[in-house]
Amino acid sequence: MSSPLYLPPDRLDDLIRQLQERGYRVIGPRVRDAVIDYGELERAADLPWGWQDQQRPGRYRLQSAEAKRAFAWAAPAQGLKPWFFAASEPLWRTQRTAGGFQVEPCLPEAKPLAIFGARACDLAAVARQDRILEHDPHYQARRQDALFIAVHCTHPAESCFCAATDTGPRARRFDLGLTELAAGFAVEAGSSRGRQLLDALDLGVASAEQIEAAQNAVADAARQQTRSLPTGDLAATLLARFEHPRWDQVAQRCLSCGNCTQACPTCFCHAREETGSIDAQSAMQVRHWDSCFGEMHGHLAGFQVRPETKQRYRQWLTHKLGTWWTQFGESGCVGCGRCLTWCPAGIDLTIEAAAILGDTA
Ligand code: SF4
Ligand code: SF4
């Protein structure tokens, strides 16, 4: 890791232009539909200058702030998942021919993405999806040349707990890592592509005061977080508490709407559907995100294996916090807090986990 340089606010456009000239499609945070979300970024003015978010269980609000910072907010409404693992996409098409059928894969257009302003939790989620979708050609077509410009988090929301999951607020893996200061950014390279970008920008070094302010801001962001998760062998403990009465209690509030799974940046369940043309000459297979709260997700071998909300919530939480460890050697939760924020019933996974696991995990 190189020592930090100083990027003045009026040089942000130069950085974005460098990315565009290198052929990247630049994606970054923007205000859209009253939330901050990742979208196409043309210029620095598109960033959410002067906006802050309020996030807590069942609530998301934007409010204007006095300080005109671009990154004074926590997690965008949706993570990076849809940019690499599309919510819905065709996998292949087939056409009837004289001799049978011709099948064609539908690989996505592969203009490389530069993600500007990626949060630590979202980068940790991408690392998890990289393992799951390692051999998926559609995911890899979008993911393989992607470049990540992280902005370390200095404004966690009430719903955040990345410090507890050890995935933030400082990003671990990036090409460039920025920390927003009162004016401008401390910036460091995390890869050779990041170093090339910094060389092209020809920036001066950050002062000792700027480096200290950047470190303090990220450390404060960790200290501000109040939520946590139980530790220990969560897979074994959750499975041992399969009949805990809390599952019935949470099921009385849970609507089985699946919002938590759609907002979660690590959830990867999906379903495939074939549709045929009315003249029976062609067909297409489409993949779309699925949810363990959906009726068809538990429809196996002709019958429903999880007919009740209790069983679906239990499946979700037990996999996310427990058996994900068994499968992948790490947690399925990166502490982004989105499942809390976007749950219409305000169900808080950290509270449910604490109630079921107690302090004996
Ligand atoms: S389980 Fe909730 S807090 Fe954890 S990564 Fe998914 S959405 Fe974020
Ligand atoms: S926990 Fe909340 S978001 Fe998830 S399915 Fe239940 S009601 Fe919907």
Image (spheres, rainbow, N blue to C red):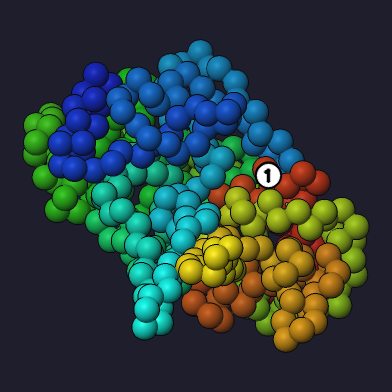
Q: Position of residue 117 (x, y in %)?
A: 37, 38
Whether residue 233 sits left or right of residue 177 in the image: it is right
Task: Please tell me which residue is depicted at 55% across the width and 65% down the height of the picture.
Answer: 279
Q: Residues within 10 Å of mark 1 (few under 14, many from 20)?
A: many
Kind of residue sitting beneath label 1 = Trp
Task: Please tell me which residue is depicted at 60% across the width and 50% down the height of the picture.
Answer: 263
As helix, strand or loop, the secondary structure at mark 1 comes to loop
Picture quadrant where residue 252 is located: bottom right
Whether residue 210 sits left or right of residue 55 in the image: it is left
Query: The C terminus lies in which quarter of the figure?
Result: bottom right
Can the viewer see residue 130?
no
Task: Please tell me which residue is depicted at 72% across the width and 82% down the height of the picture.
Answer: 300
- Identify which residue, 315 or 32, lies in the foreground: 32
Q: Is 25 situated above or below 330?
A: above
Q: Position of residue 6 (x, y in %)?
A: 21, 30
- Identify which residue, 133 or 111, lies in the foreground: 111
Q: Position of residue 335 (x, y in %)?
A: 57, 54
Can the viewer see residue 238?
yes
Q: Is 88 situated above or below 310?
A: above
Q: Is mark 1 within 8 Å of ligand 2?
A: yes
Q: Is 246 situated above or below 193?
A: below
Task: Please tell me which residue is depicted at 43% across the width and 74% down the height of the picture.
Answer: 96
Q: Position of residue 132 (x, y in %)?
A: 45, 72
Q: Which residue is mark 1?
A: 342
Whether residue 174 sits left or right of residue 127 in the image: it is left
- Furthest residue to the front? 98
- Furthest residue to the top? 66
- Identify which residue, 111 or 178, lies in the foreground: 111
